[in-house]
Amino acid sequence: MSALAVKSLHKIFGSRQDEAVRRLADGAPRAEALAGLNATAAVIDAGFEVHAGEIFVVMGLSGSGKSTLIRMLNGLLRPTRGSVTVDGVELTTLKPAALRRLRREKVSMVFQHFALMPHRTVLENAGYALEVAGLPKAERRERALDALRMVGLEERADKLPHELSGGMRQRVGLARALAAGTDILLMDEAFSALDPMIRREIQDQLLELQAELGKTIVFITHDLNEAMRLGDRIAVMRDGRIVQIGTAEEILTDPANDYVAQFVADVDRTRILTASSVMEKPHTVLDVNVGPRVAARALRETLTSVLYVTGPAKRFLGTVTEDEILRALREGRQSLDGYVSTERVRTVSEDTAVADLFADCAESVHPMAVLDDRGRLAGVIPRITLLSSLASAVPDDPSAGDDDAAPAVATPTDGPVAATPDAVVADERSGTVDVPLHSMGEPA
Amino acid sequence: MSRTASPLDVTLPRVPLGAWTEAAVDWATDTLGPFFDAVAALVDTLVRPLTELLTGVPALAIVLIVAGLGWWLRGWKFGLGTLVGLGLVAGMPYWEETMSTLAQVLVASLLSLVLAIPLGIFVAENRRASAVARPVLDLMQTMPAFVYLIPAIFFFGIGTVPGVLATLVFSMPPGVRLTELGLRQVDREIVEAAESFGAPPWMVLLRTKVPLALPTIMTGVNQVIMLALSMVVIAGMVGAGGLGDVIMFALAQVEVGSGFEGGIAVVVLAVVLDRLTDSIGDRFPSARAQRLAREA
């Protein structure tokens, strides 16, 4: 069960809210739909589920309704329509007292401008939720200090908030939410008021804490880089509506519409994209037990100079080139075993960030081999593909990298095109060589 | 004087606002008598012992205590100023009247604040109440101060009690207004934060909003005391006693000397009370936080 679920959630401010909801039902832009109506639609038909332990980022520009949305997740704002379920409890119909209990036990919040109480010390701020819950002072102190320790501020416990820097203050805000001990954390533009350097630092800290604590986090931001960095999944909001939900990669590589595409255009893609999202299918993959004759034929058929060789359980072994195949032929071998080289090809795992591929790419004579978690060949990355992934909005665009640097140039004429690189092995009896051929530049 | 008739010469009907007011006051005197008696008894039991205390203690002791308080709260310069100022008043023949005025001001301000602060909190939390309270407060504040004395005499007769009660009514508006203002100015996000951790409304109010609004509320307290002091002199007209009496007498007899002495005593009281209450407001943690915020 999801930790937090939202269904057809609406928030309309102003009068004639029912009429407003009705007019918005067919998906018309809110400015058009509500023309002449004294109502403002902040959130329109939002729906998503947040899984336990994930960071779910809601991203949008100011006015997109994201702050209103997050305030409905803990009942600070009452939805006009729709439902919010926290841990199986429907929140929209709760009585005030029950709602307050739910906030104490299940959901805490971190605010954009920290929202610390200036007249209380850092320790008293960090322990605020526990004070509300009525815990005895000693225990409050203990748990507040623990939370401050987690964010590295236990030595400032007796300072007032204004004696701290912005970054530190927000760490107090974070400690206050952590001390509450709730499973769900709502973070409303939590790092937006901080300098870029500090922001980066505190993002790292959040990720570290998250790896340790596994909270369910809903994070609101207008900063796409932040969204991409933190979010396991991202919901993009525009004009009150959620226009796309997906992982950072999905949003980068497959934007739902022009708005999202434009939004993601200036992201530092090399940090977000991984090897698996820029790799291409390898064109010539042979099993190591295939004879050199077949290999030679495969080279000829595909007009290429290198073959990727897999062994038992389809594990990637290395590459062979014309030279080695010729040598095997001369020496009369029946398999390529012993001729496969790993000298001229670098291997990387699927989830390596593109930014970390460049060094390997430079040292790899042949296109880099991308291996999955079981060591099987998942794809290859020619240099040109890597470079074009930086430039293009759609990294696996067919036009990218279909030239000389690719391992094969020819489109197969008589061999069947296999769907996966290692699906086909040669069949000598048929007289034709069924080399698993993958047409060049085929969109993944 | 003769002039030609003009169409504008229509006689407007006389609106008997005064008559209505009289009727209302008469009705109140008749029906609310026991209530007024109780109020009068309360005021009397507060003012009388306090006046006796202040006039009973030797003048020098009071001068030294207040000067010491000033030194502690604001530093030696203010302490010295207080010593000189109050010393001057003690050296004039009106010390008892000054202490009587002080007692009346303190009681009137106290009662005024007891009503004004909760009322300010109420209107801050309730927009409709705020809309109703606003014109009423405007009326209370702009009505010439003397006018309050008339119904006060009706309800309470002549003496200290009507003086104190008229003072109470006159000094209340800034207490309500500044309490409301202070509460409304509290950062919305901080209030949201308190609510988001599940704090019930009373807790949000008492542990978050009020502490953060305290510096503004204290400005209100200061204003109430200042207005009370200005009114208490006017209340001399209804025989409230104290410095008001001295000044009214000087006015009637055209005695510049004693009038000036009484006036100076009022000024010294005003300055001392103003600075002392002001510095109390500065000592709250939220005021300290505000200063830190400004320095940052």
Image (tube, coloured by chain):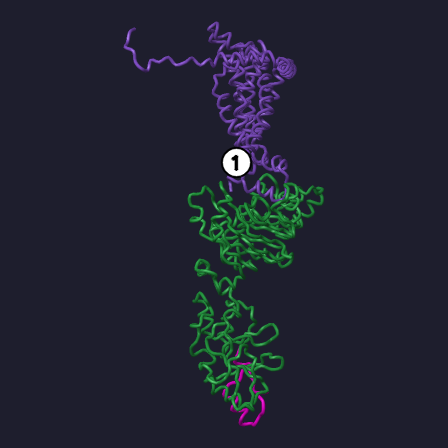
Q: Amino acid at mark 1?
A: Gln
Residue B118 appears in view: yes
Residue A129 falls in which quadrant of the image? top right
Query: Was residue A340 drawn as part of the magenta stretch in this picture?
Result: yes
Q: Nearer the viewer, residue A103 or B225?
A: A103
The residue lying at 60 percent from left, 79 percent from top is A314
Give the chain ID for the purple colour.
B
The residue lying at 62 percent from left, 21 percent from top is B65
Location of residue B71 in the rendering, given as x and y in whole percent from the top left corner = 58, 26
Residue B50 appears in view: no
Residue A253 vertical placement versus B17 (above, below): below
Location of residue A346 in the rendering, given as x and y in whole percent from the top left corner = 54, 76
Residue B73 falls in which quadrant of the image? top right
**How many numbered marks are there?**
1
| Residue farthest toward the left in the current orientation of the protein | B4
Quadrant holding the N terminus of chain A? bottom right
Q: Which residues are magenta?
A: A319-345
Q: Nearer the viewer, residue B271 or A146?
A: A146
Give the chain ID for the green colour.
A
SS class, disc 1: helix
Location of residue B20 in the rendering, given as x and y in whole percent from the top left corner = 50, 13
Residue located beneath label 1 in the image:
B185
